[in-house]
Image: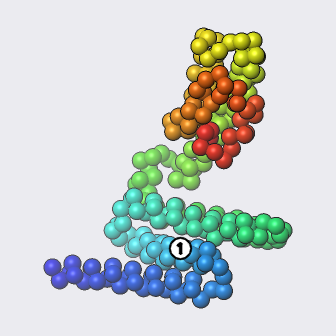
């Protein structure tokens, strides 16, 4: 019972020390609130990663695979965030090439650290490749799917335009077939529903479909 109390005290003190140190470090910066928040998150995650790496070194398995994965992904995300934000903030100014080089090096290092932090057993269950390989494969599949959807859309839309101009309506089998295919092109069910509710209702909404699907970029209608 006393051991459990010490463990609880230890985790409470660890939380206070790490969050307090991260807060003091961020608060002392001469920067905007957004930059201070990003710095706080980055410092906090870095402390947790350091502890995870130490536990990894001592072969003490007290962090579950799920949390190891969360820690690793969070570390990479904060690295990206703290480097991307200045790009957005100073987008009107040309950043030096050295900045992008340093960012690339930091990103590679953070990915490697995340890979070491994550549970290898969990990775083996997913496949032989590293978690980064799996992530890249998922991104590639998504891009391939988007490219295929774009190709199909660009082939079908001109046909749909001609049919509508010739007096065919949504009730006709020809238009219905095209509409059914178009309705399956968005990436997810929610996006397909949004797409259908906006454009696939009647002849009038069909005529509002853009010729180029890049029009949908940045919306919850496509990929």
Rendered view: 10 above or below 87: below
Return the residue nearer the eye: 113 or 94: 94
SS label for mark 1? helix
Instruction: Pinpoint residue 128: horizontal percent, then vertical percent.
Output: 50, 47
The part of the image, by quadrant, that contains residue 222 is: top right
- Which quadrant, please, contains the C terminus? top right
Horizontal side of 55 relative to 197 (left or right) equals left
Horizontal side of 83 relative to 8 (left or right) equals right
Rendered view: 33 above or below 160: below
Residue 151: tell me if it is visible.
Answer: no
The part of the image, by quadrant, that contains residue 142 is: top right
The image's colouring method is: rainbow
Residue 96: tell me if it is visible.
Answer: yes
- Which quadrant, please, contains the N terminus? bottom left
Instruction: Pinpoint residue 137: horizontal percent, then vertical percent.
Output: 59, 44
Report the residue at 61% width, 74% height from top.
34
Rendered view: 187 above or below 163: below
Return the residue nearer the eye: 1 or 91: 91
Instruction: Pinpoint residue 45: horizontal percent, then vertical percent.
Output: 50, 72
Report the residue at 63% width, 70% height from top.
82
Horizontal side of 199 relative to 66 (left or right) equals right
Report the residue at 65% width, 37% height from top.
146
Label 1 Cα crowd, 10 Å radius (few <14 / some 14-19 / many 20+): many
The part of the image, by quadrant, that contains residue 15 is: bottom left
Report the residue at 39% width, 59% height from top.
65
- Residue farthest toward the left in the current orientation of the protein: 1
Instruction: Pinpoint residue 207: horizontal percent, then vertical percent.
Output: 71, 26
Return the residue nearer the eye: 127 or 4: 4
Horizontal side of 144 relative to 68 (left or right) equals right
Residue under label 1, please give it: 41
């Amino acid at each position: 019972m006393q051991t459990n109390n010490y463990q609880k005290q230890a985790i409470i003190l660890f939380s206070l020390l790490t969050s307090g140190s991260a807060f003091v470090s961020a608060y002392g910066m001469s920067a905007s609130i957004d930059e201070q928040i990003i710095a706080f998150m980055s410092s906090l995650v870095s402390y947790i990663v350091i502890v995870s790496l130490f536990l990894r070194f001592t072969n003490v398995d007290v962090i579950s695979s799920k949390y190891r994965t969360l820690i690793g992904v969070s570390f990479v995300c904060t690295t990206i965030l703290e480097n991307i934000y200045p790009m957005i903030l100073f987008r009107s100014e040309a950043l030096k090439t050295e900045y992008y080089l340093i960012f690339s090096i930091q990103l590679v290092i953070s990915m490697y650290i995340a890979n070491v932090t994550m549970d290898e057993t969990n990775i083996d269950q997913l496949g032989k490749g590293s978690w980064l390989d799996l992530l890249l494969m998922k991104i590639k599949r998504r891009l391939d799917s988007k490219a295929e959807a774009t190709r199909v859309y660009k082939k079908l839309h001109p046909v749909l335009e001609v049919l509508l101009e010739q007096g065919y309506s949504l009730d006709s089998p020809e238009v219905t077939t095209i509409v059914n295919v178009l309705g399956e092109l968005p990436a997810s069910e929610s996006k397909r529903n949004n797409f259908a509710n906006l454009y696939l209702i009647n002849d009038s909404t069909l005529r509002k479909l853009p010729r180029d699907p890049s029009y949908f970029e940045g919306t919850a209608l496509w990929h």
